Image (spheres, rainbow, N blue to C red):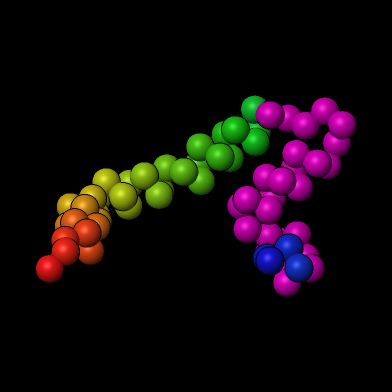
Amino acid sequence: MPLVLLKSEEKFTLPLRQAYMARATDNPSWVLILAATCLAVIPVVFIFLALQKQFVTGVMEGAVKG
């Protein structure tokens, strides 16, 4: 969906930019693509680790029958 809405490359999200980099040439630079993937995942992991207790509590409360 973002690819349909975004016309300029400056506004591409990181996954779109990575897909564009992978398809741009016949021999994509996988090192750069993997480095960008690692940089994209790091904030998500830190947020999950910081909020892990609340996340697990919410999942457990939703699983209780009664």
What secondary structure characterizes most of the magenta part?
helix
Q: Which residues are magenta?
A: 5-30
58 left or right, relative to 14: left
Q: Considering depth in this image, is 27 or 66 the residue closer to the camera?
A: 66
Q: Quadrant of the N terminus?
A: bottom right
Q: Is residue 61 visible?
A: no
28 left or right, relative to 56: right
Residue 17 picture location, percent across and down:
69, 50
| Residue 19 in the image: above or below residue 34 | below
Q: Residue furthest right?
A: 26
> Which residue is painted at 63% across and 58% down in the image?
13
Magenta span contains residue 32: no
| Residue 3 in the image: above or below residue 5 | above
Q: Residue furthest bottom?
A: 5
> Which residue is painted at 36% across and 44% down in the image?
45
Residue 44 picture location, percent across and down:
40, 49
Residue 27 picture location, percent across and down:
82, 28
> Which residue is painted at 51% across and 46% down in the image?
40
Q: Considering depth in this image, is 56 or 50 the residue closer to the camera?
A: 56
